[in-house]
Image (tube, grey):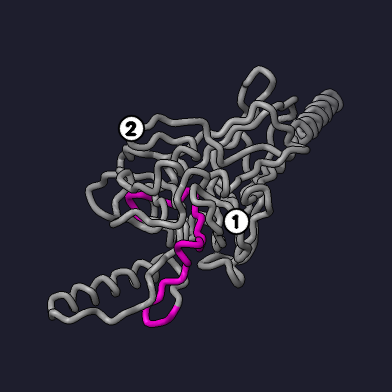
């Protein structure tokens, strides 16, 4: 026993030393994000002037986006994945939801709380840059949001089983397109109500035309301008079965070779995103604003700003995100 005991003690001390080393070999990271409109802080209900190709006034009501596959880069460009904190609210696996609306007052169809940082751990090192994906990974993008863990259970961010989630959701009123849909004199509070209002008005006009009577005069219909980015061209055997692939994944890889996680902030600028978009006019027979449809004439400028190809135009450098 006297000979065995020292060996056991030595093993125990080595195990403890290894545990201490492992615990201190990681460093916590909080990757800060912010949202602005032309350099001014983003806020629901706040109006911003000189936006888009027509220099319109916009009044946002929502701004949320998913990021995934976050990596830190060393001076040689080697990438180290950030292991995300699994907080059961904003972060799940390698996915995080950044949320700049709190569901109050002018923040329509939202939820309580804000989330402006991606948190996690990486091995200690000398990191000089950052890389992440704007969007939801394919393997997480096509499930049932009613049973999905948070933040994939936020149905306002979900499109359909085939298309998956809205990677980016930005809604706003504009000078030319107020956000209220005037159906029966009541404002519509979310996109489903707005589209239902449009369908109701179209049906009333069709019925009037069939009866040979002029339709009742109503205020001009407008449903605001929205930017909803997500995958398209996702073919599946049924509406509720996941696709095997999407012809337009619409995920964006964003890289900043120079980034200090302790000092810098990743900034999403709505004004820069809309720089070449006419937010005052909606293309005929299309959803309000740009919702990623390949034939939507409202989308070329927006998709280019995201850094995505669109139609016959190749991808250009993204300008939605910058570093501050």
Q: Which mark is residue 312?
A: 2
Residue at horizontal 69 percent and vertical 44 percent from the top? 32
Q: Is residue 181 above or below residue 288?
A: below
Q: Looking at the image, can residue 90 be seen?
A: no
First-in-chain label (1 vs 2): 1
**Highlighted range, magenta:** 160-186
Q: Which mark is residue 49?
A: 1
Q: Position of residue 260 (x, y in %)?
A: 74, 33
Instruction: Kindly report the secondary structure that dominates the magenta region of the rendered protein.
Output: loop
Q: Position of residue 245 (x, y in %)?
A: 32, 38
Give yes or no for residue 171 being in the magenta stretch.
yes
Q: Nearer the viewer, mark 1 or mark 2?
A: 1
User: Would you identify the image quadrant in which residue 12 lies?
Assistant: top right
Q: Element at badge 2? A: loop
Q: Position of residue 64 (x, y in %)?
A: 55, 54
Residue at horizontal 57 percent and vertical 66 percent from the top? 107
Quadrant position of the C terminus in the picture: top right
User: In the depicted view, which residue is nearer to us: 6 or 300?
Assistant: 300
User: In the depicted view, which residue is nearer to us: 318 or 148?
Assistant: 318
Q: Is residue 126 above or below residue 251?
A: above
Q: Position of residue 267 (x, y in %)?
A: 65, 43
Residue at horizontal 39 percent and vertical 39 percent from the top? 249
Quadrant position of the N terminus in the picture: top right
Measured Cα–Cα span from mark 1 to mark 2:
31 Å
């Amino acid at each position: 026993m006297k000979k065995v005991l020292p060996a056991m003690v030595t093993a125990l001390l080595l195990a403890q030393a290894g545990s201490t080393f492992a615990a201190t070999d990681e460093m916590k990271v909080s990757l800060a994000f912010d949202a602005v409109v032309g350099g001014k802080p983003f806020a629901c209900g706040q109006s911003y002037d000189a936006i888009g190709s027509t220099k319109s006034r916009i009044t946002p009501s929502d701004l949320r986006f998913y990021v995934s596959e976050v990596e830190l880069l060393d001076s040689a460009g080697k990438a180290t994945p950030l292991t995300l904190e699994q907080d059961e609210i904003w972060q799940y696996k390698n996915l995080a939801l950044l949320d700049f609306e709190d569901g109050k007052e002018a923040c329509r169809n939202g939820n309580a709380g804000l989330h402006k940082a991606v948190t996690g751990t990486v091995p200690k090192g000398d990191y000089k840059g950052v890389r992440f994906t704007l969007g939801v990974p394919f393997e997480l993008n096509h499930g049932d949001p009613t049973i999905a863990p948070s933040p994939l259970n936020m149905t306002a961010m979900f499109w359909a089983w085939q298309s998956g989630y809205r990677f980016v959701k930005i809604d706003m009123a504009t000078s030319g397109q107020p956000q209220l849909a005037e159906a029966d004199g009541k404002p519509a509070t979310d996109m489903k109500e707005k589209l239902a209002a449009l369908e109701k008005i179209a049906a009333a006009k069709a019925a009037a035309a069939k009866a040979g009577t002029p339709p009742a005069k109503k205020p001009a219909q407008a449903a605001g301008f929205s930017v909803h980015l997500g995958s398209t061209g996702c073919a599946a055997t049924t509406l509720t079965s996941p696709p095997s692939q999407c012809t337009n994944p619409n995920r964006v890889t964003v890289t900043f070779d120079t980034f200090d996680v302790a000092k810098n902030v990743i900034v999403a600028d709505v004004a820069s995103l809309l720089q070449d978009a006419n937010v005052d006019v909606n293309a005929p027979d299309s959803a309000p604003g740009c919702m990623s449809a390949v034939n939507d004439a409202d989308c070329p400028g927006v998709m280019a700003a995201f850094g995505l190809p669109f139609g016959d135009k190749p991808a250009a450098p993204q300008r939605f995100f910058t570093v501050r």
